[in-house]
Image (cartoon, rainbow, N blue to C red):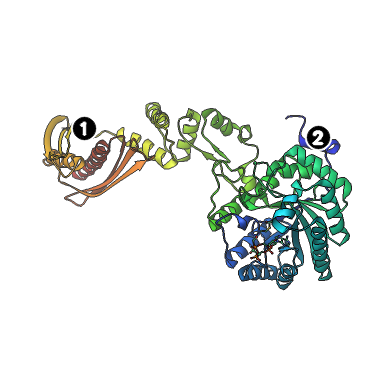
Amino acid sequence: MYDKTIETLKKEDMNLADEIYIFDTTLRDGEQTPGVALTVDEKIQIALKLDQLGVDKIEVGFPAASKGELQASKEIRALDLNSTVVGLARSVKDDIDAVLDADLEYIHTFIGTSPLHRDYKLKMSKETIISTAVEAVEYAKDHGLTVEFSAEDATRTERDFLFDFYNEVVSAGADFIDVPDTVGILTPILTRELMTDIKENFKIPVSVHFHNDFGLATANTLTAIECGANQAHVTVNGMGERTGNTSLEEIVVALYSAYGIKLNIDTSQLYSLSDFVGRLTGVKMPVNKPIVGDNAFAHESGIHVHGILNNSSTYEPISPELVGHSRKIVLGKHTGANALKSKLKDYHIELNDEQFEKVFNQIKALGDRGKCVTDDDLKAIALTELSSARETPIKLKGLGLLCGAIVSPTATVKLEIDGVEKETSNTGVGPVDAALNAIRDLIQDTMDIELEEYNLEAINGGTDALADVFVISSDNEGNKSTGRAINEDIVMASILAVLDSINKLLLIKRTQEI
Ligand SMILES: CC(=O)SCCNC(=O)CCNC(=O)[C@H](O)C(C)(C)COP(=O)(O)OP(=O)(O)OC[C@H]1O[C@@H](n2cnc3c(N)ncnc32)[C@H](O)[C@@H]1OP(=O)(O)O
């Protein structure tokens, strides 16, 4: 074990708060993801799941924004959740009244403090900014609300003014001050400096609300927590304006596994919550999204899979079960024999050494062509290999095709039937049809077959995909049999699948005759 873990460093180097609160704003800032709009019912469903997960606070919306926002806030509040229900408001009386109308007890109110926000957006002097904020806090407090105050764009605000501002809202009664990094410009070292300064100067709980414009929201939030932040604003899947907010799942898991901090969160629900929110909002996570992405616990490289099969910790920092996810072994160009063996074992497919080699080589060859192999592909390839090993009365010995715009598609097929070679040609609407007609001619003395179903699927997509053909054939005595073959050539796959089914029918027929 690496001996300088955060656990051993934290006492001397960190200023961790006794308790760290998770303030989830998926339903407010998360919903501000461009293109996302949730119905009242969807908000309720997500709030219930967040409550089950165990977050401390759920910011359910902006009650003044619309009737639906007010209704959702009201209905979620009426659920009497364990999590505290929070509503957002500008420093405006009507907005605060909307939070009160929703019966909420906790308000998150804000005003821009940076020169950019003061001069270009609000067009207010520093004094007006402070007096507007103070009035809002006093009004909210007079109405019994717990108040969390955000200095919007705090990280681009002059430090002196920021501290004057926080001092005034704290004196007016704010219960929490929030530090938003509104356009995500912080880095860990800047966060450390800012947070240390804030914690030295303010004794009330401090919250951080960080954006992910440079991909640093999680790192910055963790740094703020190391420096004493009492609360982290987060969203499921890191949803939010532009590139999003600090991700709930990343913070919770990092605090647990790297810092040994166990919050009141049931981590085993993280993956299903992420999936649920992804489906309701239509915002799908990239496969490499930490913790909840499809590849978070997926392995392809032979060396990694070999390690994982012996001890999953070799290549996984946490177990997928911790977050309700699952491990996936993916086959492809980088696959090793151990991975393939383990997959085949999972599917109870036993191959001899020669068959194994052939399947292994096919997977590598597919990988070299830029493809990866799904579990279904593997099963099809392995089962085809198995069935091709059976003793077959009819064998394909040759195939010639003539196709084009001005000729009838013609196929010449050579078969060995019970040891005797026969060859014929026939035409059809296309090369597959022509080849199947030729086969029918060649076997007519042996048996009469009908092709009942023909199904062609491309494995892996692309013009160089493997063709996977599945057929059902019947004979004139009512016997039916399936056939399947995989080949790079559609005609070959079709012929081999049909011959597979014919061979099975022939074996059935001969067994019945004994
Ligand atoms: C940090 C954040 O993410 S803030 C939250 C952002 N979320 C949203 O904006 C979603 C919900 N918003 C809305 O539905 C609407 O913007 C509303 C209902 C809030 C306001 O709508 P409108 O009255 O039409 O104003 P509009 O959105 O065009 O402009 C915002 C107004 O609020 C003012 N304002 C912005 N922030 C604040 C604030 N914190 N305190 C007081 N006033 C503010 C602006 O100066 C502007 O005022 P103006 O119209 O007098 O110039």
Whether residue 361 sits left or right of residue 107 in the image: it is left
Q: How many marks?
A: 2
Estimate how packed mark 1 is, as few (under 14), some (14 to 19) or many (20 or more) residues with alpha carbons within 10 Å. some
Q: Secondary structure at mark 1?
A: strand
Whether residue 320 sits left or right of residue 210 in the image: it is left
Whole-Å distance between the Cαs marked 1 and 2? 69 Å
Q: Quadrant of ligand 1?
A: bottom right
Whether residue 336 sits left or right of residue 497 in the image: it is right
Residue under label 1, please give it.
396
Q: Is residue 156 visible?
A: yes
Examine the image and state in which quarter residue 223 appears: top right
Amino acid residing under circle 2: Thr
Image quadrant in which the N terminus is located = top right
Residue found at the very far bottom of the displayed protein: 101
Mark on residue 466?
Answer: none
Examine the image and state in which quarter residue 276 appears: bottom right
On the image, the x and y values in percent for residue 485 come to: 30, 39
Q: Going 37% across and 28% down the picture, which residue do you hit?
A: 358
On screen, 47 above or below 258?
below
Amino acid residing under circle 1: Leu
Residue under label 2, please give it.
8
On the image, the x and y values in percent for residue 162 come to: 82, 50
On the image, the x and y values in percent for residue 104 come to: 74, 68
Whether residue 26 sits left or right of residue 484 in the image: it is right
Q: Secondary structure at mark 2?
A: helix
Q: Is residue 269 visible?
A: no
The answer to which of 365 and 390 lies nearer the viewer is 365
